[in-house]
Amino acid sequence: MQDFKLDKILPLVQKPARYVGGELNSVTKDKDKVDIRYAFCFPDSYEIGMSHLGIKILYSVANAREDTWCERVFAPWPDMEEKMRENNIPLFALESGDAIKDFDFIGFTLQYELCYTNVLNMLDLAGLPVKAKDRKGLAPIVMGGGPCACNPEPIAEFFDLFSLGEGEELNSEIMDLYKEHKKRGSTKEEFLVDAAKIEGVYVPSLYDISYNEDGTVKAVTPKNGAPEKVTKRIIKDLDSVFYPEDFVVPFIDVVHDRVTHEIFRGCIRGCRFCQAGFLYRPIREKSPEVINEQCKKLCETTGYDEISLCSLSSSDYTKMEELLNLLLDWTGEKKINVALPSLRVDNFSEELMKKLTGVRKSGLTFAPEAGTQRMRDVINKNVTEEEMLETARIAFSGGYCAVKLYFMLGLPTETDEDVEGIGKLAKKVVDEFYNNPDRPQGKGVTVGVSASSFVPKPFTPFQWEPQATQDELKAKQEHLKDTLPSKKINVSFHHIPTSFLEGVFARGDRRLSEVIELAWRKGCKFDGWGDMFLYEKWLEAFEETNVAPEFYANRKREYEEILPWDHLDYGVSKKFLINENKKAHNAETTAHCRQKCAGCGANKLNGGHCDV
């Protein structure tokens, strides 16, 4: 019946290929021959979700189990949602077309705070209560993972459990335990008490939160044997861990339509604003031989003609020259492009550029983050203006004539002089092009400046800092525009209210669950999409729940304050983060991991070892 209804509505919506499944390399199984059905949900559009490497890996890991069928689910675009609700079509999985409310697991990857209303909308579309306490019976288990799981408190009421850290092994352990409890006829509560004993599993219902009169957290109290601190999971050996031999190839264009391959996890740099740089420690590298063979296999099984080597800082991979030599041995002949995103300006060499331009050129993107050296020292970027201009010279000599530079506005201690420095640095990059005799002749230069609004995040040295207010951020944007010294510079800004909301939820607590639910009931969803963002509805939700968003976004925390995520352990010690915060206010830098170990503590997760 549902197939018939889909046939009826698909001609009426944009991009029906988002909803039909059946793509190359998608996995179908006999549902009567599996014990566990897993709906892997990405709470955003098909095009965004199908570009994400994590979902590709975990989809394949789960389907490698004979007892499990993992299927993909994406947030239907509003036109499709409208038709689904009109025709009583519940949210379904792409591979089978079956309603996901009948699955054993519904797992959400949480990549961005502004996806939270989509999570609720997808649960509601599935025909399920949005709050965990209202979902009776063992199944479905609603679980979350990904970077936002490092502080899941604002959405704790909607989830049964969270997996902290890397999921390749952890998810399988959760499913093994579930399988036992399913055979036993256990209640959900019995399963969750046992699940909390698995390292990396956080069960919010097993923790009571109390608050002080000033609204700060007073205590987080575990019960029923739950651990006082939940420690994230990591994969210790990237060479031996499961990696897919194929990816699902979409029918339509998606954001990153190519082979994406992870070359290492973690980051040596310690930029104080960067949550990922601390969440994914310790550093672990994959060997060039394994990467090369896996890339070759993926190109064969998908037909893609581009490989993107992904990490937090690709040029910090210690065996890059060896890896590129292996890849270029066969990619050049097959006209396959090799792209290196996330390059550092201080180790982009002429040799690296020549290898990258051996195939077709892609644009170069670098992230100075701040316009003055003082500000770069505050954030521990550890790059100089001279290094950036030398990088530009190398790129322009190699034939590039377009560079994009990423900066942030609203960083701690930032002054008007620091804001003006962004334009001045971009102008020096423009001048470097025209002063370079080896530049591409007959062409002009394009320097793009993207200036996002700084959002303080948990597990970073800036987790105690206030976010700049919306008025302050608007003034900084105007000041940068007014002081741009060249028409060759194109500047773009992030939307300030969305950054504000991101700041609220990044460091929020459980009292925000009520706000999120009310905003969703008022029609909020796809909040990360500018034309869908209903800021007035969010303000109404805060007012009606008597919650002040500025308490979470714009308030400075004291070091002694109990933070909503203090009962979760991502490896980096609080003592280290406090020390880094103090050094930031003195504009003192910390050497990167390969120069000197700063004692962050994350190597304890890997037996005292980092691949540095």
Image (cartoon, rainbow, N blue to C red):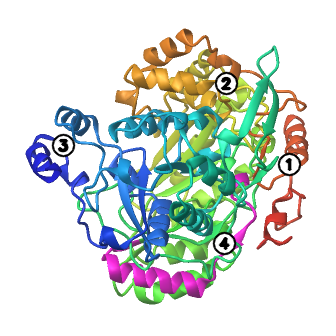
Q: Name the residue tied to disc 1.
A: 589
Front of the two marks 4 and 1: 4
Front of the two marks 1 and 2: 2
Q: Distance between the residues labelled 4 and 2?
A: 35 Å
Q: Name the residue tied to disc 4.
A: 317
Q: Name the residue tied to disc 3.
A: 14
Identify residue type, mark 3: Gln
Q: Are marks 3 and 1 in contact (CB under 8 Å)?
A: no
Q: Distance between the residues labelled 1 and 2?
A: 26 Å
Q: Name the residue tied to disc 2.
A: 553
Judging from the image, what secondary structure is the residue with disc 3 in? loop
- The reply to whether residue 489 is in sight is yes
Identify residue type, mark 2: Ala
Q: Is residue 39 positioned above or below 541 on the image?
A: below
Q: Is residue 535 positioned above or below 251 on the image?
A: above
Judging from the image, what secondary structure is the residue with disc 1 in? loop
**Is 204 contained in the magenta span?**
no
For label 3, the crowd category at 10 Å Cα-Cα, with few meaning under 14, some 14 to 19 and many 20 or more, is: few
Which residues lie in the magenta part? 278-306
Question: Residue 579's spot in the image, x, y percent?
Answer: 91, 43
Q: How far apart are marks 4 and 1 (CA)?
A: 22 Å
Front of the two marks 3 and 1: 3
Front of the two marks 4 and 2: 2
